[in-house]
Amino acid sequence: MWWIKWVTIHESYGLPRVAQECRRYLESQGIRVRINFKQTKRAGHVYMLQVPADQEELARICLQAFKDAIS
């Protein structure tokens, strides 16, 4: 059995809407994605978009292209 090392490539504060949109886009590009969250005292919730370490470089490129397209 092998283990997957997950790396965080994006964090969103407040509502999970942005993290969900990024997740959908990355999955459409064939990248495995998971969203973890933690509760903080100051910001409410922090949503962390994570990808496998071996797909990190491609995911960062795709995520930047997505962000450029929506801005």
Image: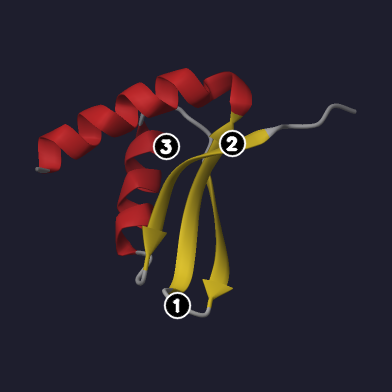
Say which residue appears at 38% left-offset and 58% top-offset.
12
Kind of residue at badge 3: Glu
Position of 9 relative to 61 (above/below): below
Kind of residue at badge 2: Val
Say which residue appears at 51% left-offset and 25% top-offset.
56
Residue linked to disc 1: 42
Position of 23 relative to 30 (above/below): below
Kind of residue at badge 1: Arg
Counting from the top left corner in percent of width and height, residue 21 is at: 30, 51
Please identify, in this view, whether the residue under mark 1 or under mark 2 is nearer the observer. 1
Say which residue appears at 47% left-offset and 64% top-offset.
46
Counting from the top left corner in percent of width and height, residue 11 is at: 42, 52
Quadrant, the C terminus: top left
Residue 42, picture quadrant:
bottom left
Residue linked to disc 2: 7
Q: Distance between the residues labelled 1 and 2?
A: 24 Å
Element type at marker 2?
Answer: strand
Question: Which numbered circle lies on residue 27?
Answer: 3
Please identify, in this view, whether the residue under mark 3 or under mark 2 is nearer the observer. 2
Q: How crowded is mark 1: few (under 14 residues within 10 Å), some or many (20 or more)?
A: few
Position of 41 relative to 4 (above/below): below
- In the image, farthest residue toward the front: 42
Between discs 1 and 2, the one toward the N terminus? 2
Counting from the top left corner in percent of width and height, residue 6 is at: 64, 37
- Nearest the viewer among 13 and 4 is 13
Between discs 3 and 1, the one toward the N terminus? 3
Between discs 3 and 2, the one toward the N terminus? 2
Residue 44, picture quadrant:
bottom left
